[in-house]
């Protein structure tokens, strides 16, 4: 007689209560399948590593966000882009906006919404490994499933256990939430280019939901760069921008820090009956480091594709479906150029030129962006002139 099969406990187990993981689980549960989300944290809103900005494209395209409580978001209609000299231009696109979020409570809302759809959440449960069986996988200490979705972050343990690709290029970032601070130009996402403070990326300030968020990120390798100290990086950034936005007296009520994948989608990103989504898949823009939109969009699509497969309506999505994952061709090219040719002198000079406008439109507004026609490059006052 053949070896007895392990009892199947779920149709699909999703590892990680992330944006991508919860979106996948929501789609599977809505399709009527048994889905369990395994998350090592006891609170899906704790210990986050994201700024939490949701772009308008996500609101337009993802019906799951239709019921997102208005109290958890704040609309920001434009971008103020600063050169290293602290001169700036205002960028906007007709009808376009960003949503700053109360990210911890957005994650809690998404987890509750996924549970109401029928998914089971096992919080405080760590993924330690899995073994393949004929009809799926057995997860150590969790149970067995016909399919596994890895949504467990940029250092995915699911990827390692399944022999899938891993992220190799990163940005190292830190963000402070400053309660009680105010921002004069609260309708702008303030972005700062400075090769000394944020090599390979940017720093930022925005008026969030009840807080001011200030962050800085820089190029990293397989680990945080040598000498990278998040508090020192933030102190240097806040000193730098004090002539225009002085936040030096504010104290952080919350600190987020971690690695952000920026090398594009990993290879391989899937194998029979297992695939990766979100940060685990490297599904993050190589230029903006934005990943919420793609995590939600492709997480939902992955959940639907897995549901179709498990109901016998489609082939295993680990083959054809994952070809629909974003390629980021233009943004990988911009990332390559930024890594090699970033200079403060060039950005001081190029800020108001047409090529920079085109690049900024691509980066921030997905080809929709333009300079505000009523704005010019504005030299800002130095502290002694205030």
Image (cartoon, grey):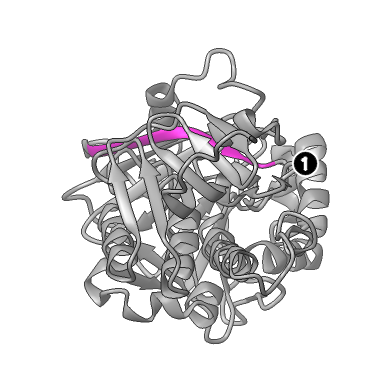
Mark 1, other Cα within 10 Å: few <14 / some 14–19 / many ≥20: few
User: Element type at marker 1?
Assistant: loop
Looking at the picture, tell me which residue is in the foreground, 211 or 294: 294
Say whether residue 260 is magenta: yes
Point out the residue furthest to the bottom here: 95
On the image, the x and y values in percent for residue 200 come to: 67, 37
The residue located at (31%, 59%) in the rendering is 111
On the image, the x and y values in percent for residue 183 come to: 30, 58
On the image, the x and y values in percent for residue 350 come to: 75, 55
Q: Is residue 285 left or right of residue 380?
A: right
Point out the residue furthest to the left here: 180
Write the start and end of the magenta stretch as one range: 253-262
Please say if 138 is above or below 77: above
Mark 1, residue position: 267
Image quarter (top left, top right, bottom left or bottom right) of the N terminus: top right
- Residue 198 is at least partly visible in this image: no
> Residue 133 is drawn in which quadrant?
top right
Say whether residue 340 is magenta: no
> Residue 193 is drawn in which quadrant?
top right
- Residue 350 is at least partly visible in this image: yes
**Number of residue marks:** 1
On the image, the x and y values in percent for residue 271 come to: 72, 45
Q: Main secondary structure of the magenta part?
A: strand
Q: Is residue 322 left or right of residue 218?
A: right
> Residue 231 is drawn in which quadrant?
top left
The residue located at (27%, 36%) in the rendering is 124
Please say if 316 is above or below 382: below
């Amino acid at each position: 007689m053949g070896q007895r099969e392990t009892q199947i406990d779920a149709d699909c187990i999703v590892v990680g209560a992330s944006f991508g993981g919860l979106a996948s689980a929501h789609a599977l549960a809505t399709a009527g399948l048994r889905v369990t989300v395994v998350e090592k944290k006891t609170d899906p809103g704790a210990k986050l590593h994201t700024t939490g900005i949701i772009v308008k494209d996500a609101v337009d395209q993802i019906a799951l966000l239709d019921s997102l409580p208005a109290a958890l978001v704040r609309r920001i209609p434009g971008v103020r882009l600063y050169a290293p000299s602290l001169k700036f231009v205002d960028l906007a696109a007709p009808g376009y906006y960003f949503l700053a979020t109360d990210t911890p409570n957005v994650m809690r809302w998404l987890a509750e919404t996924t549970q109401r759809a029928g998914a089971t959440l096992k919080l405080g449960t760590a993924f330690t490994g899995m073994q393949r069986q004929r009809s799926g996988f057995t997860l150590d200490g969790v149970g067995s499933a016909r399919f596994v979705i890895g949504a467990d972050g940029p250092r995915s343990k699911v990827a390692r256990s399944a022999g899938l690709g891993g992220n190799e290029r990163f940005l190292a970032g830190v963000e402070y939430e400053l309660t009680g601070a105010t921002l004069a130009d609260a309708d702008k996402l303030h972005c700062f280019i400075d090769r000394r403070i944020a090599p390979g990326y940017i720093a930022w300030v925005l008026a969030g939901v009840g807080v001011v968020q200030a962050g800085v990120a820089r190029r990293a390798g397989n680990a945080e760069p040598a000498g990278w100290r998040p508090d020192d990086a933030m102190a240097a950034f806040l000193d730098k921008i004090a002539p225009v936005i002085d936040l030096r007296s504010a104290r952080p009520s919350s600190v987020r820090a971690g690695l952000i994948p920026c090398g594009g989608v990993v290879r391989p990103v899937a194998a029979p009956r297992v695939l990766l989504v979100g940060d685990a898949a490297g599904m993050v823009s190589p230029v903006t480091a934005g990943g919420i939109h793609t995590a939600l969009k492709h997480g939902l699509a992955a959940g639907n594709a897995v549901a179709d497969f498990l109901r016998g309506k489609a082939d295993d999505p680990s083959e054809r479906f994952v070809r629909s994952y974003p390629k980021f061709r233009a943004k990988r090219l911009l990332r390559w150029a930024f890594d090699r040719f970033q200079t403060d002198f060039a950005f001081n000079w190029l800020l108001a030129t047409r090529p920079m406008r085109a690049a900024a439109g691509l980066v921030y507004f997905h080809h929709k962006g333009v300079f505000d026609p009523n704005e010019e490059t504005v030299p800002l006052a130095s502290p002694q002139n205030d």
